[in-house]
Amino acid sequence: MSDVPGARVHIRRAPDRANYDRATVHAVLDAAVVCQVAYVLDGEPRMVPTAIMRRGDHVYLHGNRQSAMIRALQQGALAAICVTHVDGLVAARSGFHCSMNYRSAVLYGHAETVAEDDKEALLGAFVDQLIPGHGAAVRRATAQELNATTLLRIPIDEAVAKVRTGGPIDDPADADLDIWSGVIPLAVVPGAPIAGEGCTNLNVPDYIAGFGKGS
Amino acid sequence: MSDVPGARVHIRRAPDRANYDRATVHAVLDAAVVCQVAYVLDGEPRMVPTAIMRRGDHVYLHGNRQSAMIRALQQGALAAICVTHVDGLVAARSGFHCSMNYRSAVLYGHAETVAEDDKEALLGAFVDQLIPGHGAAVRRATAQELNATTLLRIPIDEAVAKVRTGGPIDDPADADLDIWSGVIPLAVVPGAPIAGEGCTNLNVPDYIAGFGKGS
């Protein structure tokens, strides 16, 4: 991944919020369980939300082998992939300067299909990306399941993260206006785990009970 | 908005989760402050996250008049717009059936530019979509601010929502496996408001203090 942005990811609006460095892009991707994937079909855009996982310098997408998105990317359509996290609502003293705190990443690349021999381990990693620890708990994938699922990977070569943090940036002329300004932080918070209807093992595993509470 | 899906939004994977009815699509859109917008530029996909607001049978996007996305849509590029909410992580007894609870909406349409006379009120509504109540508190937009901002609207004619709720749907053959299965609910939770550095009015308004606590 180059630190010099290509034309597709070169940010012209609010360029001070753009990060092309690998660590920032990876951190934004790693915080996501879903992304949006866009591609061109017959000259028109198509977009679908889907699960995402980063490992090394690739992101991984998976889907039913019949999925229109999977097939389009396998046939060589360029993938545009975006993840967005909203971290806060920024209340300025003017509407113009109201904003959001966010972390987003957009990347462009061509997918390659992961080889059959590598699929089982990487699909297990996908489960762990969703719920850390659960990948080792589930029963092994069957040949039929592996066969039904296509796993794609896209290199993180052409990517940009955009990050806004902090409070409102008001016009200096508005400094004395008697209007509350500040930030409402937003966080994604896990609730208490809910056992499935058919769940016979009611001992909540530590990795479920501790989800989202740090390592 | 027709209840008969067009080809762009016809859902073939998990069609039981697809909703083409207006109320469901509107509800998913209304819960969002950001969306992803994709369009085609020189035959390639481009995607950006941006703020979204629904009013009636349109969604509204805004941006700097020089924004590449704004200009492309003004020049007639078809917009693909997606919002995605992740409501829970679904731990099944097999990796294959692990999933997420989510609400997503995808719509396709051509943008029209909102007339100058209508911009001020709708940009105020945008502030209220972000932080209900704040639209009436901010100082009025200046002519320069209104001039710098382009407001687009896209009809919600061709749209689909996809919603998954509930617990894991395990294979019947896995019913006796001694593996915890269930859901970790996820919610976006507002934290305590943080006054901006330059905020001279330290009385937190009711609409800020009560944010996210219902009407």
Image (cartoon, coloured by chain):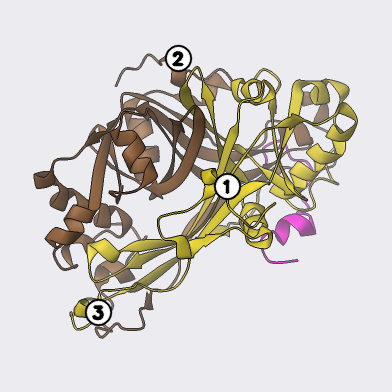
Chain colours: A yellow, B brown
**What is the x, y in percent for residue B202?**
28, 84
Q: Nearer the viewer, residue B30 or B73?
A: B73
Locate residue B58: give its quadrant.
top left
Which disc is residue B7 wearing? 2
Q: Which residues are magenta?
A: A195-215
Residue under mark 1: which chain is it in? A
Q: Residue at x 71, y 59 (%)?
A: A209
**Of the residues shown, which amino acid type is indicated by label 3?**
Pro
Residue under mark 2: which chain is it in? B
- Classify residue B67 as left or right of residue B181: left
Q: Residues within 10 Å of mark 3 (few under 14, many from 20)?
A: few
Q: Nearer the viewer, residue A162 or B182?
A: A162
Is residue B119 highlighted in magenta?
no
In the displayed orientation, state which residue is furthest to the right.
A117
In the displayed orientation, state which residue is furthest to the left.
B117
- Classify residue B122 as left or right of residue B60: left
Most frequent secondary structure within the magenta stretch: loop
**What is the x, y in percent for residue B179?**
82, 43
> Is residue B105 in sight in this rendering?
yes
**Of the residues shown, which amino acid type is indicated by label 1?**
Gly
Q: SS class of the residue under badge 3?
A: helix
Which disc is residue A6 wearing? 1
Which disc is residue A172 wearing? 3
**Of the residues shown, which amino acid type is indicated by label 2?**
Ala
Nearer to us of marks 3 and 1 is: 1
The answer to whether A68 is drawn above or below residue A152 in the figure is above
Residue under mark 3: which chain is it in? A
Q: Residue at x 60, y 20 (%)?
A: A68
Q: SS class of the residue under badge 1?
A: loop
Q: SS class of the residue under badge 2?
A: helix
